[in-house]
C-alpha cells in the first residue's frame, strides 16, 4: 500500500486516535518518517483533533491531548487490530438496477408492439368489414343487373325509341314497356347529366287529344352508372317523352324542355 492509499484508507486517523496495534503503529511511524506527505497528513489530523477538542474545552492543551491519546492507545492495544478494507463496487446492486432497467425497457417495447398490433388488427377488421360490404353490394348489384337484363330481354316487351328534340339535339333514350306486367323501364344512357337543381321526368302521353301522365323522375341519375331506371307502371300510352324539370318534378310537362320523344 503506497502513501496515497494509506492517506485515503482512513488508517492514519486510526493511528492518531491510537486504535492500531503495535505492528501497524510501527509501520505508520516508519512511513511518516520516510514520506513527508504522510507526515503532513498525520499532523493535519492531529491539529483537527485539537481544534475539535478546543471547541468543547478551550483549556485543553497539547499535553492533555497526548495524555488522552496514550490512555486510548493503551486501552486498545489488547484489542483485535482494525482491518481497513478498500471500498468495493456493489456489483449485486448495480446488476439489480441494470436488470430492472432492462425489464422496464422490455415492458415498454412490448407495450408499444401490443398497441401497434391492436391498431393493425382494428385496421384489418375495418378493411374486412369494408370488403364484406363491398362484396355484398356487388352481389346485390349483380342480382339487380341480372334482373334488369332479364326484363330488357323479355320478348313481351315493346321497345320504344325516344328521339332527340330541339331542346337537346344529341339526346336519345329507350323505353321498355311490358304490356302484360305493365312495367316500364327507361334506358337513359343517351342523356347528359341534368343541371344542378333539375331532374329528368318521364311521361306516358296520349297524342290525340294530347295529355301527359307522369310515371316517375329519374333520381340518382349522376350516381347510377347503369342509367337504366324502373318507373311507374302504365296501362295506356300512345307515346313516351322525357322532359327536364325542377327537382321533385312537375304536375305537367314543360314542353320547351322536351328532350326526347317517341311514339308507339
Image: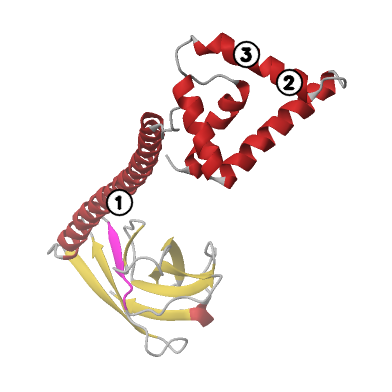
Is the C-beta separation of discs 3 and 2 under 8 Å? Answer: no
Q: Is residue 16 above or below residue 178?
A: above
Indicate the secondary structure of the residue bearing disc 3.
helix
Q: Nearer the viewer, residue 141 or 44?
A: 44
Q: Earlier in the sequence, mark 3 or mark 2?
A: 2
- Pick the residue in front: 258 or 77: 77
Give the number of the disc on residue 72. Answer: 3
Quadrant where the C terminus is found in the figure = bottom left
- Give the farthest residue toward the right: 58
The image position of residue 137, as x and y in percent, is: 27, 53
**Residue 9 appears anywhere in the view:** no
Among numbered discs 1 and 3, the one appearing first in the sequence: 3
Answer with left or right where residue 136 lies relative to residue 257: left
Name which residue lies at 85% across and 18% down: 57
At x 46%, y 79%, the residue is 258
Q: Is residue 139 left or right of residue 167?
A: left
Q: Is residue 233 left or right of residue 208?
A: left
Residue at left offset 19%, top offset 54%: 143
Instruction: Specify the quadrant of the image occupied by residue 262.
Output: bottom left
How far apart marks 3 and 2 lie (CA) works out to 10 Å
Contact, CB < 8 Å: mark 1 with mark 3? no
Mark 1 to mark 3 CA distance (whole Å): 88 Å
Badge 1 density bin: few <14, some 14–19, many ≥20, Cα 10 Å = few
Q: Give the secondary structure at mark 2.
A: helix
Which mark sits nearer the N-terminus, 2 or 1?
2
Foreground residue among 80 and 240: 80
- Image: magenta residue range: 183-189
* Residue 188 covered by magenta stretch: yes
In percent of width and height, residue 236 lies at: 33, 61
Residue 248 is situated, as x and y percent measured from the top left of the image, at: 53, 61
Residue underneath mark 2: 65
Amino acid at each position: 500500500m503506497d502513501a496515497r492509499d494509506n492517506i485515503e484508507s482512513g488508517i492514519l486517523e486510526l493511528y492518531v486516535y491510537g486504535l492500531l496495534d503495535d505492528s501497524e503503529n510501527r509501520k505508520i511511524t516508519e512511513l511518516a518518517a520516510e514520506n513527508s506527505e504522510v507526515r503532513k497528513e498525520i499532523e493535519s489530523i492531529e491539529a483537527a483533533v485539537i481544534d475539535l477538542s478546543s471547541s468543547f474545552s478551550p483549556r485543553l492543551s497539547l499535553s492533555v491531548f497526548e495524555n488522552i491519546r496514550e490512555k486510548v492507545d493503551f486501552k486498545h492495544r489488547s484489542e483485535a487490530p482494525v482491518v481497513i478494507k478498500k471500498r468495493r463496487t456493489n456489483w449485486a446492486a448495480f446488476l439489480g438496477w441494470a436488470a430492472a432497467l432492462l425489464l422496464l425497457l422490455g415492458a415498454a417495447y412490448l407495450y408499444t408492439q401490443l398497441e401497434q398490433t391492436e391498431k393493425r388488427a382494428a385496421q384489418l377488421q375495418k378493411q374486412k368489414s369494408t370488403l364484406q360490404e363491398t362484396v355484398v353490394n356487388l352481389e346485390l348489384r349483380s342480382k339487380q343487373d341480372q334482373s334488369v337484363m332479364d326484363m330488357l330481354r323479355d320478348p313481351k316487351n315493346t321497345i320504344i325509341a325516344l328521339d332527340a328534340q330541339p331542346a337537346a339535339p344529341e339526346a336519345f333514350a329507350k323505353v321498355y314497356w311490358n304490356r302484360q306486367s305493365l312495367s316500364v323501364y327507361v334506358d337513359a344512357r343517351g342523356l347528359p347529366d341534368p343541371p344542378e337543381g333539375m331532374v329528368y321526368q318521364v311521361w306516358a302521353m296520349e297524342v290525340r287529344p294530347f295529355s301527359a301522365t307522369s310515371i316517375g323522375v329519374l333520381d340518382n341519375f349522376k350516381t347510377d352508372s347503369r342509367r337504366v331506371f324502373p318507373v311507374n307502371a302504365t296501362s295506356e300510352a300512345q307515346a313516351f317523352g322525357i322532359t327536364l324539370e325542377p327537382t321533385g318534378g312537375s304536375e305537367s310537362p314543360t314542353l320547351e324542355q322536351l328532350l326526347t320523344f317517341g311514339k308507339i
